[in-house]
Image (tube, rainbow, N blue to C red):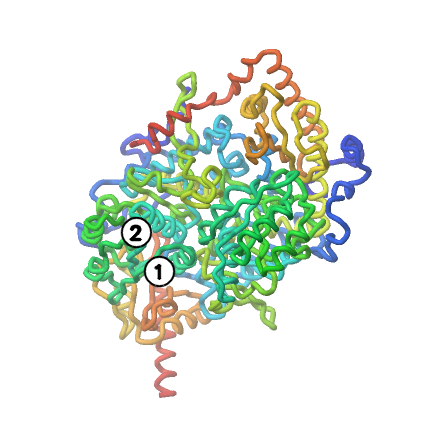
Amino acid sequence: MPYIPHTQAERDHMLATVGVQSLDDLFADITADMRPQSFLASRGLPEQEVIALCEELANRNQSVLSFLGAGYYDHGIPAAVDALAGQSAFLTAYTPYQAECSQGTLQAIFEFQTAVARLMELDCANASLYDCGTALFEASTMCVRAARKRKIVLDEGVNPVWRNMLHTYAANLPMEFVLVPHRDGRPDKEALIAAIDKDTAGVVVQNPNFFGVVCDYADVFAAAKKVKAFSVVAVNPVLQAVLKTPGAMGADIAVAEGQSLGLPLNFGGPYLGLMACTKALIRQMPGRLVGRTHDKEGRTGYVLTLQAREQHIRRAKATSNICSNQNACALRSLIYLSLMGPQGLRDVAENSMEMAHYAARTLTAGIEGTQLLNEAPFGNEVALSLPVSADLVVQRCLAKHKVVPGYPVGRTYAGLDKVLLVACTEKNTIGQVGILLDAMQDVIADILQEEALHG
Amino acid sequence: MKMQTIFEKSVPGRRTTGLAPEPAQHRASDLVPGELTRSEAVRLPECSELDVVRHFTQLAKLNYSVDANFYPLGSCTMKYNPKVTEVVAAMPGFNKVHPLLARIGNGQGCQGSMHCLYVLERSLCAITGMEAFTLQPMAGANGEFTGVSIIAAYHRAKGRDRRIMLIPDAAHGTNPASAAMAGFTVVELPSRDGMVDPEAVKAAMEKYGENIAGLMMTCPNTLGLMEVHLREVAALLHSIDALVYYDGANMNAILGKMRVGDVGFDVVHLNLHKTFATPHGGGGPGAGPVGVCERLIPFLPSPRITRKADGSYEFLPDNPESIGHVGPFYGSFGVLLKALAYILRLGGEGLERVAEYAVLNANYLRAKLKDVLDEPYDRICMHEFVASAPAGLKALDIAKGLLELGFHAPTMYFPLLVHECLMPEPTETESMQTLDAFSDAVHAIVARAKEDPDYLAEAPRGLPVSRLDETEAARKMHLTEDM
């Protein structure tokens, strides 16, 4: 029996100690009429067969050259991240409720909180949330609770995946969202400011936004402050090494998808929600917080603190229902940031941005009828307007060249069927951008020819 | 020696060479206007690779973990996490795939991963007797939110506004918190003999009538007892078309012995990090798939996966009745893969053995501790049991005494209705010898404490720190190096 250590003699001794005849006697409370008619039919496999089967499935996924981003990026991961975060003393521990035997986890969370707060230039950070979408929801509820109002002004340039999640989570709560449309992929700051009024609890934007556009939202956040509303910005944590910070813009809460900080793309997770805020909002924060303190001998130590916000104490009145978080992912990101340091993270950010700018120049110069969607500054991702359907280009490039040129924006934004969102990281090379250009030139020529033939 | 933080170990100008690329030719301020850039460098640690390796290796040594210590935390199912599941989850063919690849064309780029999702969903259906599962929820509590949102959507689709969620007094705190997030008013049900009491359900129904949307139940419950009135309670709720929710925190006890879908539960969440052996990670990530009966399928989160006649997989278009997206994509795939590998390794028969030996271990430990701890429910338990510290002793002190002896403590002070509560859950992967050693430790601690009342007040000794000043932590709010 895999992973069950009992010998037959031990089992019999234990049954006798308990005072029953058989294992099934232990389940007498589950009466015959409640027993299953069927159960999982498959037989257990030896370890090597499990590995072989899964390897075969992994190989069924295609190996592609991908410029997909849209909030989730293929940055490099140093080998030391896997080696250190994979230590079983981290991986097979529980939530550090017994502080004396959990100082490793607790100190790591304290360091993580420090790193996230410094990245955002805000006062403090929590121990992680599930992902950026849930972090945005939690941030919105913080605004609603703290402001005692219910309206959230939401920029359409916030990742549509996360906006969808916001609506799911807020569906049964007294919150309303006012969506402010983008203008050719750029935030409409005047419209954002105009949408903020005395009923506004918070304003939610993203920088760079979904289209890659970099912006300073200080004036929007100042407008929110005037009506006692709070400001939330979702950022790209890698680019935060070089871009103006949430703190410097006057944001009250910053969130981010932490996947870029040492987590593999992994077909959708596990990911990592980062959240930082000003000191004034600490008690509104969801999730765990670690604080530094001392023992009786005066030694420094770390404990979970301010737990009166949490579900195991406050139950229905808690700031959130979150219990399990993304601790092992947070640890990975802390190790990643420690290995990178300020200069290393900056190098990753600038190389990624530089490659995206190179790709934008190469594709607009090399493909007739292709241009930037707008003239706004961008980071490591850029929206291009193609002469044909972006969805078709991406499909054809994958099928014919095993290249995924990016994300077809029309999938989530009406009227932008020809817009392609191209992301680069420091891993991409000039040679790869050349392959991308060739693939796109080829399929766009095919499509144009077909369109000419069929009118 | 004081364990410095990684920030305290930083040396200005030191770099880990060879990890990051060379500096770019353009600075950020060449690529975007200067006023959009950061004015000061991020104050991250400046360390060598060895500095970082040594730091996190030393930190790991300060933890207790399942791999190093017996970790009998009740309601957490701290079983052994098989290494083969880590091997599977680390396969590059899986973990380098971008989630949006599934949206390109017909998902031909990621059929292997989609196959895994499909097989896991079908396996969970066979294990629980539910009709369909969403794998999207990212933790148990996230699954609870998903489940109660489905209940809300069901009633809304029937054109009624039901606001009350019944929750037993012994429930985990996440239950009322999740219900509140989905807009419900929580009404607490008093338990009788440690069980949900059909009379209390009837009383609530008389008071709130058709305002009741559902009932959230954990089974076995948080006292480690099988709920014996399950069918009666489910029938009562169903008589007013209210739904019955199964919190799968304690599913480990009933694998193969009872399928919750067969006995009247309408919605269920599972904790893959408990029952299906994915590591707890020091607090996460987990995974909390949600299963439903047939009439609730339309409300499941989008997108749902399907297998086509030709054997390929695709994600279905969003259903208009769906509660929407609770996660960004299709679930925490890396965690789901580990659970799938575990299920493949054990098969149906192996899973049934899990329940049998988890329950045997709990009852054996209960029998061994009967003479030293007070056991409020003197009957066969399921995978865990509750006990009270003997008169004059505190559960907290016994817990700290156990830490001193190299054991992680059982869950303490939960459920609240048990006086000075300790709740051990040994799990099936522990040997008789480990349970004997734990029992000996509890006996020794209690005997010593009765002789020397101050002995436990100083515990734990010999760990990196002794008991920490929690009041100082809350008052000073020293949450980062800079606060």
| Disc 1 chain ID | A
Which amino acid, by three-letter code, is at mark 2? Lys
Q: Earlier in the sequence, mark 2 or mark 1?
A: 2
Distance from Cα at disc 2 to Cα at disc 1: 53 Å
Quadrant in the picture for the N terminus of chain A:
top right
Q: Residue furthest top?
A: B451
- Could one spot residue A105 in this view of the protein? yes
| Disc 2 chain ID | A
Q: Is residue B219 left or right of residue A341?
A: right
Q: Where residue A39 appears, x then y in whole percent?
A: 71, 55
Q: Secondary structure at mark 2?
A: loop
In the rendered image, residues at marks 2 and 1 fall on the same chain: yes
Residue in the foreground of this view, choosing between A159 and B363: B363
Q: Where residue A351 appears, x then y in whole percent?
A: 30, 51
Mark 1 burial class by Cα count in 10 Å: few <14, some 14-19, many 20+:
few
- Could one spot residue B302 in this view of the protein? no
Quadrant in the picture for the C terminus of chain A:
bottom left
Placement of B295 over or under B249, stated as above or below: below
Q: Is residue A51 left or right of residue A160?
A: right
Q: Where residue B425 appears, x then y in whole percent?
A: 63, 35
Q: Nearer the viewer, mark 2 or mark 1?
A: 2
Q: Secondary structure at mark 1?
A: helix
> Residue drawn 57% across and 48% down?
B272
Q: Residue furthest right?
A: A21
Residue in the foreground of this view, choosing between B326 and B397: B397
Mark carried by residue A431:
1
The residue at which mark 2 appears reads as A149
- Quarter-wise, where is residue A68 in the image? bottom left
Placement of B72 over or under B307, stated as above or below: above
Q: Is residue A232 left or right of residue A49?
A: left
Residue in the foreground of this view, choosing between B217 and A376: B217
